[in-house]
Image: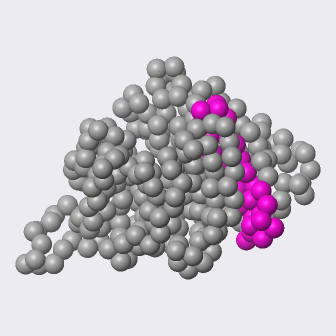
Amino acid sequence: VGMESGIITFFDAGSSIFVTLYETVIGTGGDVAIRWSPNGRVIAISSGSTFVLLDTVYSGESGKHPQNNSRFFVRKVIQAGVNFASLTFSPKSEWLALTDTRTQILDIKNNCNCVRVLDQENVLSSGWSPDGSLFALVGTRDVVSIYDARVKSPSDWELLFSISFDITLNTLCWGPSIKKGLQYLAFGGDDKRATVLEIRTFERTWEEILGIPSKSNINDLDWNDKGLLCIGDDDGVVSIVDLSYLKSGRAVNEMNYNWQRQGLICTMKLTRNLGRNAITSLRWLSSNAVRNNRNLLVVGGSDGIVEIVDLPDRR
């Protein structure tokens, strides 16, 4: 859990009582982002203009590094002249995308060396599709950029789409990857609407298939492998939309209207300090880490509260 003061705290959440494992201070004066790599090996943290990469396995060499009982070892520190805006790992934990005024693709296994710089300015959110084939960027430039990331090295990526929108886009997330060449991307921002695109990679085409309204600006999105999309807004509302019908492996233009209508009506809303709290962070816990196949959602807000919500499976 990260706070604006730069305090980062790690908890053991294996039971109903949270036990503090480790606490540190990393930078001040800006937004905090924390990402655990998909393989569980490293943790990336940006706070203000400071970036730190922690190793969760390696604890240092005896006689060379100080004795460390915290289980975390600092592998890399980067200081920037401006605040970091976004960070995200690739699905296989090979690459890290780190954004300040530009987006750098860092090689995790090679001391975080930069292998590619993407020139889109004012990026606020980025991410790989779950199968690693596509990489997207959104921000205040009013453009959604999508790169073909199927090649081995990011230095060889090609820009697949550059899609213009007349709004600031604060966040994006990818839907589950079910079929090669068919991906779904959701994004939202200051237009009080979550937009879902269907991307047909082999045809090099895209289509806007859904627009999900919100009563205020959208700050964060997350989409789990069951097809549940959660939307967090400025009014303290979390909306959960069931888009599992998109996991059929068929393009939307091959479906009947009832399938699409089902996705729009299967909605649940959660509120916390309505009108006095902005939902700033949402994260589904991985189904691999959750017992009994439950839907656990972590919700953080400007009210300083982090809660884990157990959502019933409605199907």
Give the image location of residue 245, x and y in percent. 78, 53
According to the image, what is the colour scheme of the structure?
one colour
Up-down relation of residue 218 to residue 286 (above or below): above
Is 2 or 31 nearer to us in this picture? Answer: 31
Where is the N terminus found, in terms of image quarters? top left
- In the image, taking residue 15 as reference, residue 20 lies left or right, namely left
Up-down relation of residue 48 to residue 43 (above or below): above
Q: Main secondary structure of the magenta part?
A: strand
Furthest toward the left, the residue is 63
| Residue at the image point whose x is 47% and y is 37% from the top | 280
Give the image location of residue 40, x and y in percent. 40, 67
Total labels drawn: 0
Is 41 or 79 nearer to us in this picture? Answer: 79
Task: Residue 227: say if magenta.
Answer: no
Which span is picked out in magenta?
A: 180-206
- In the image, taking residue 230 as reference, residue 115 lies left or right, namely left
Res. 2 image quadrant: top left
Give the image location of residue 84, x and y in percent. 38, 49
Decide if residue 197 is in sight here: yes
Is 93 or 225 nearer to us in this picture? Answer: 93
Res. 73 image quadrant: bottom left
Give the image location of residue 184, x and y in percent. 70, 56
- In the image, taking residue 227 as reference, residue 204 lies left or right, namely right
Task: Residue 184: say if magenta.
Answer: yes
| Residue at the image point whose x is 36% and y is 59% from the top | 44
Up-down relation of residue 210 to residue 246 (above or below): above
| Residue at the image point whose x is 44% and y is 62% from the top | 104
Up-down relation of residue 211 to residue 96 (above or below): above
Decide if residue 131 is in sight here: no
| Residue at the image point whose x is 47% and y is 41% from the top | 281
